[in-house]
Amino acid sequence: MDAEEPAKYCKFCFGTEEDSSLSFVHPCRCRGSIHWVHHRCLYLWFSKTSAIQQVMCTQCQTRYQKQLTLKPFRMWRFPRFRCDTFSAIEILADMVVTYKMITHFVGMLDGTNTILSELLYFFLWRIGIVSKGRLCFYGNVGTRLASGIFRMSIDDYEERRDIKARLPSDIDWDEISGAAGPN
Ligand SMILES: [Zn+2]
Ligand SMILES: [Zn+2]
């Protein structure tokens, strides 16, 4: 572990441990004035920021390790889900292109469509939808929908690293955890 950290304060609201009883987390490799953040402030920020920034810290490129735990049944509720017009149009466009690609693929198999037109749709689909931004967006939609019955928490980066240090070192755990992620 590192030498002692300076007094904890939240990178978003600048609140210190004396100011409130809110819990802190260090979710990524960032240090110094942006080392600590309140759990609550981080979740508030997730609800406002871009899809990619909800998945990883864009400053240090650390992917957040989110955990979902099942809430007690009496706390289940319908998830809050806002969708602006622009996102709705994007989702619709994604669905149309995906549908077209699949129906074209079926058509190609029974000979009514050419391979060329299928390739065209596949290209559109590959470029437009299977992009990092869109995959993050859908991952976040899934997390938001799951929030009705699951409680999300963020793992502390240092604790994660301590656990990793105790695992066998001949395996690339970063690669494995990256590949196992929903995005
Ligand atoms: Zn805060
Ligand atoms: Zn960071």
Image (spheres, rainbow, N blue to C red):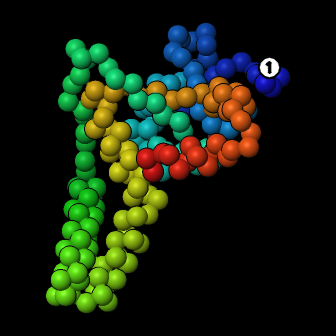
The spot of residue 72 in percent (x, y) is 29, 15
Q: Residue at x 73, y 31 (%)?
A: 165
Give amino acid for label 1. Glu
34 vs 96, nearest the viewer: 96
118 vs 159, nearest the viewer: 118
The spot of residue 55 in percent (x, y) is 49, 44
The spot of residue 168 in percent (x, y) is 71, 36
As drawn, 155 above or below 113: above
Q: Secondary structure at mark 1?
A: loop
Taking the image as shown, residue 1 lies to the left or right of residue 36, namely right
Mark 1 lies on residue: 4
When asked about the image quadrant of residue 149, the answer is top left
The spot of residue 156 in percent (x, y) is 60, 27
Taking the image as shown, residue 182 lies to the left or right of residue 176, namely left
Q: Residue at x 35, y 39 (%)?
A: 143
Residue at the extreme right of the image, as rendered: 3
As drawn, 105 above or below 31: below
Q: Residue at x 40, y 55 (%)?
A: 135
Residue 33 visible? The answer is: no
Question: If the image is split into quadrants, where does the N terminus sit?
Answer: top right
Determine whether the beta carbon of the residue marked 1 sits less than 8 angstroms from the nearest atom of ligand 2: no
Residue 145 visible? The answer is: yes
110 vs 63, nearest the viewer: 110
